[in-house]
Each structure stands twice: as C-alpha cells, then as structure tokens.
Image: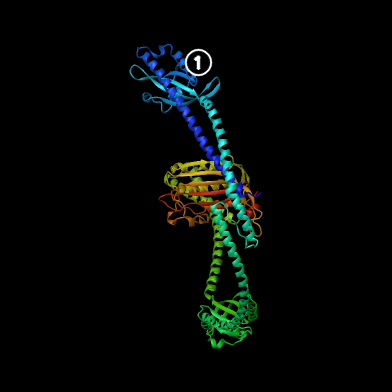
Amino acid sequence: MKMTLEKRILLFSFLILFLAISVGSGMDIMALRKDQVNALQLRSKGLATALKSNIEKVLNLGLELKDMTGVSEKCREIIEGNQDIAYCVVSDLSGTVLFASDPRFITFPARQLLSAPNKEEDRLESGVYKNRISMAVDGVDTTFYDSAVPVLGPYGKPIALAHVGFSEQVVSDKMKGMVFKTLFLLAVSLFTSFSLIMLFMKKYVMQPISVLLKGVKQISEGAFDTQIGEVQVYEFNELARNVNIMSQFLKNRDAQIKKNYEDMERTFEELQESYRKLERLSTDLERSEELYKSLMEDASDAIVVIGGDESVRMVNKMAEEFFGYEAKELLGLPLTKMLLLLNISNIPKVHRIFREAAQGAHIAEEMQLCKKEGGAMVAMLHASSIKSGSENVVQAIFRDVTREREIILNLEKSSADLARLNRMKDSFLGLASHELKTPLTVIMGYSELITTDLSDRIDKTVLEMVVNIANAASRLDNIIKDMVDVSMIDEKRLQLKVEDIQLNRLIEASVNELRFFFSMRKQEVEVNLDESIPTIRGDALRLMQLLSNILGNAIKFTPDGGKITISTSAKYLLRGKAGSDGSGEGREHHLFLEITVTDTGIGIDREDQLRVFDKFYEVGNIQEHSSGKVAFKAKGAGLGLSIAKGIVDMHGGEIWVESTGYNPERFPGSTFHILLPLAPGIGENNTDYSRLLR
C-alpha cells in the first residue's frame, strides 16, 4: 500500500512532537530527581554535622568516644524526626561501627568506604564525603546515599565518622507522582499539538495540492486550455500560475511540432538528394588507396598484395630488400611464378594458404625461401584479406625470423645436453656411492679393529692417526649414505616402512638427539607441540632423518645464542587429483599435520628459497664448506635438504622455506614448513611412490 504525502507529513510531525516532548519531559524528570537527591543529601549533611557537633562537645570534656552513652539514642532521635532518613551510624577510623540508630545497621560497610581511594586519612579534615553504597537490610539488597562527616578529637584530628544516609527507594517514591503528572501533560500536549498540525495540513497543504493535482492531470491528458484557479497559500498559488503558463506554452509547442513535422517531410526529400551526392563522393574514396600505398611503402616488414586473379598487384620497398628483387621484376607475376622465383618449397600448400586468406581467414605460417643472391632465410608469413573497391585482395606480410629460429634450435640443443648431463650425473651418483661403499667398509672395519682390540699393542701416535682415519671414514660414510638415499629417491627405489607414528614424540626424540649440539652452540630450543593432533601413517626412521636434516640446517645457520622454535598443528587443505579440464574437479579436503622450524639465523635470499632443495646445492661460497657438523655457516655436500624433500614427497606432503632475505648481520631468520598427510598417498605428488609402500 502506497503511503500518501499527507500520511507521511502527519507521521513525521507526530514523531517529531513525541520525541521533542519526551526528551524535554525526560530531562525535567532527571533534573527533579537530581534536585531531590541533592536536597536529601544536604539534609543528611546537616544532620550529620549536628551529630558531630554534639559528639565533639562531649569529647572536649575529656571523655573517650567508646565510653560515651546516649549516642545511639541521639541517632534514633534524628531518624524519628526525619522520615526520609534511613540510618544514623557512628564508626571509628578502622571502619568498626560504634553506634547505630538501628541494630540492623551494625553491619554498615564503613570499612569498605574507608578503603576507597578517596578516603585517605589526610582528607578527612576537608569536609563531607558522599557515597553510594549497597547493603542487605532484612535480607533485601538496598542502595543508600551516604553522607559522612569526620568527628574531630580534642587535638583537631579526626577520630571517627558520623554517617547519615537515606534510601534510594525514598527518592523513587517521591518521583512516582511527578512522573505520572509529567506523562499526563505529555499526552495532553501531544494530542493538542498534533490536532492543530493536522487541521493546518488539511486546509493549507493537502487541499491546494489536490487542486493542483487535478489541473495537472487534465493538462497531461492533452487539455492544454485548462486553467487552475487561485489557492489560499502563496507558494501553491505561484505554482498554479506557473502551471497555467506551462499549459499555454505546451499548447504553442504542440502547434509548433505539427509545423515542424511538415518541415521534416521536406527535409527527407532533401536527404534523398544528398544520398545521391554521397554516391558520387564514393569515387573520391577510392583515391584514398594512394594513402594506403604510401603507408605500405614505409612499413618495416615486406608486404606483397595479391589480387583476386592471383597476380602480384603491389610490392613495397622492404619487400625489394627482403627478396633481393626490384618491384618491376615482381609486379604482374602470377603467384605460382613468384613462389618458384623465391624457391619456396611445398607450393600447393602456400596456394591453399592464400586461397583461405582470400576467404577471410587470417593465416600465419613459417616457410623457407631464397633471396636473389642465393641466401636462404626463414620467414613468417601473415596473410589476410582486405577490401579494395569491389575486389578482395590478399595482403601478405613477410618477416625475417631466421635469427629467432637459430636461437630456438640452440635452446633446444642446450636443453637436450642439460638433460643428458643430468642423467650422467645421476648415473655417476649411484655408481660412485656403490663403488666407494665397499672399500670404505673395509677401512672402517680395520680402523675399528685397531682402535678396540689392538689399541694396547701400537704406539699412541699411530693410534691417534687411526682414530682420525676412522672419523674421516665415518664422515665419508654419512656422505655416501646420503648419496645412496638421493639416488634411490631419484630412481624411486626407496621404500617406506609405514606404521602408526606419534609425530610429537618423534620430534621430541629428534630434539633430544641433537641436544648436545644445541648446548654446544648455546642455542635456545622452544618446542610448541599441539597434543590434540592425531597419529599419522609413515616411516619413523625416514621422518627422523627428515627432522634431523632440517634441525641440523637450522643449527648451522643460526649464530651462537640464537633461538630455534619447533611447532606442530593440524589443518584442512584441498588436495586430490585435478579434473581433466584443469578446474580442480575431484579435489577434497584432507587433514594435514604441519611442522614449522623457525630460526633466528642469517636467512635465505628469495631467489635461493626454491633451489635449496636441489641436489648438491648449498647457499654461499664453496670456500665456506666445513667438515664440522654444526659449525656456524658450515656448508656440506648439499644433500640434506634434497633428501628431506624426497622423504616429504614420498609421504605425500610438501616442504618449503620462507625468509625475508639473507643478512648475516641482522639475522632475519628462516622458517621451514613441512606438511604431512595422515597417511601417504593423499597428495598429488606421491602417486608414483604408492607401489613402493610396504
């Protein structure tokens, strides 16, 4: 239902009046309440002051306050003479009630008032204190306005407080009558004001609007002779006068439109004559082809125009330079003869290209041709149809791409060579690890035999040399084991022994294994493990190897006294096989466990954050390589992170590193993220490993 203007104005007027009167009345009530509270507080202050004076007179006679009698009766007299006053209490400075007008107020919370921030003893000499307190009287929680006056001893020091107060209910009872009276006046004022506004609206707004609306409606229906009479309101009368003027104007405009329609018919005949003139001007447009020829001559590509009869119509300057033939040698030649002249192979295919281009297709084709001097080149042909008068011609653009083709061939050759070198490197890796393992086992065996069973038979200097040989062999054995692991990961021969694993316990064991190195480097280790994460399926030995490599990397690149933080959490991620259209159809949410290892080390450059997981890649100079396992900035063989990534991939997870950059002075630090699914086989990257699980 549509709301008329009259209803809108009346509703708005009612709301404005109601709000104005309500706000005014509310403010009056609040002011009255405040006045009532102030008056009662003033009376409480006077009563407390009178009681104080009586007590001080007795104190000046040398009597102790606690030995005084009749104070409670004096308090009751004050209450009986003032019906609005609820209590009269005298308390000492420790908050103990000494005298009270009513035994119910023996529990008066004087101690609570004294412990408030504004009740220091040095302020008791300044005057009356006013507070709002709540206490239970006859089992009912009641709010009181309390006025406390300090009672001074013979030496001018406060020794007690005289409290007189009244209940908040007294104020509320006094205000009820005032509120009802105010509400009645509000209703009367609202009704009277609204009635006056409604009468005013009817006579001076809605009635003139109705007259104007009726006249405008007649004019809108085409009765332009309609005249609206005078109305009582000046503004509406002016509007009526202007509507009458508009009506006369519309009448004149209607006559003018009819006249203009006749003029338009004559103009249409003139347009027909103009159209015939335009046909004559179309011949002038053909001359614009000269402009096209000029542009074609200055083009940077070789351009040849073939006519509908498959003959050469136009050749630009760049085509002369490109082919080595002058324009006069090519103009007028059939397309087949020009192709033979340029020694282009597969002429039927090129003919088909030009025919398709003549039908409107845009063709791009690469071909080989020979210049007049005999030089061979590779050209990219772009053929398209253009309109020339009533004939469709083919514009063929030739661009020399010989250099680009040579670059592409060189890149393809380089890519093939790199792939071959990578295969050779992998073969060498497997062969070297296999061939080195057997002699290294013999060296380690004999070294262990000498250092254990024959240590008492050889010289100490020789024994120390053998121990160094054993240590070197052990380091070499670790490198060979890493090489074997990398080789097996690359060849997808590394098998996982899957079992249920408590990841948090595995992390604690890895940290305990490296605890000596943390202590040696004076590094702080913080472990934040989420105990709510579930168990996962995986290879415990390989996951320990993964954690040891990541934590060892953090130890090496974090300075002495730095901090390393290990955290675990669970999160749902979208994983699974993407749809055939690449839209991600078939993906599902799976629960992954995330391990983060954050250090306060030297950080990693952004361009190195993807390559750190490559085989034999170590960030930094080769001169920084060290045999120390956890020495600061020591570089190893560059296999630890590669093995870590292979283990994560085999478990169907992901690993990456985040760092703001490399800075050995400010130590921005790095964070390694490891995502592991609840069971291997969830991720997209490990489908080739599923057959190796046992």
Q: Is residue 216 left or right of residue 322?
A: right
Near-viewer residue (459 or 182): 182
| Location of residue 239 by image quarter | bottom right
For residue 97, above or below residue 491: above
Badge 1, how many Cα within 10 Å: few under 14, some, many 20+?
few
Percent x, y for residue 428? 54, 59
Q: From this viewpoint, which residue is outermost toward the left?
A: 155
Percent x, y for residue 694? 65, 48
At x 56% / y 68%, what residue is drawn? Answer: 412
Near-viewer residue (634 or 333): 333
| Location of residue 48 by image quarter | top left
Can residue 466 be seen at all in this image of the molecule?
no
The residue tagged 1 is 103
At x 61% / y 67%, what residue is drawn? Answer: 254
Number of marks in the image? 1
Percent x, y for residue 403? 52, 74
Near-viewer residue (182 or 155): 182
Can residue 23 be seen at all in this image of the molecule?
yes
Question: Coloring scheme of the render?
Answer: rainbow
For residue 426, above or below residue 409: above
Percent x, y for residue 245? 57, 62
User: Dot 1 lies on which element?
Assistant: helix
Tag 1: residue type? Pro
For residue 271, above or below residue 10: below
At x 55% / y 71%, what residue is drawn? Answer: 409
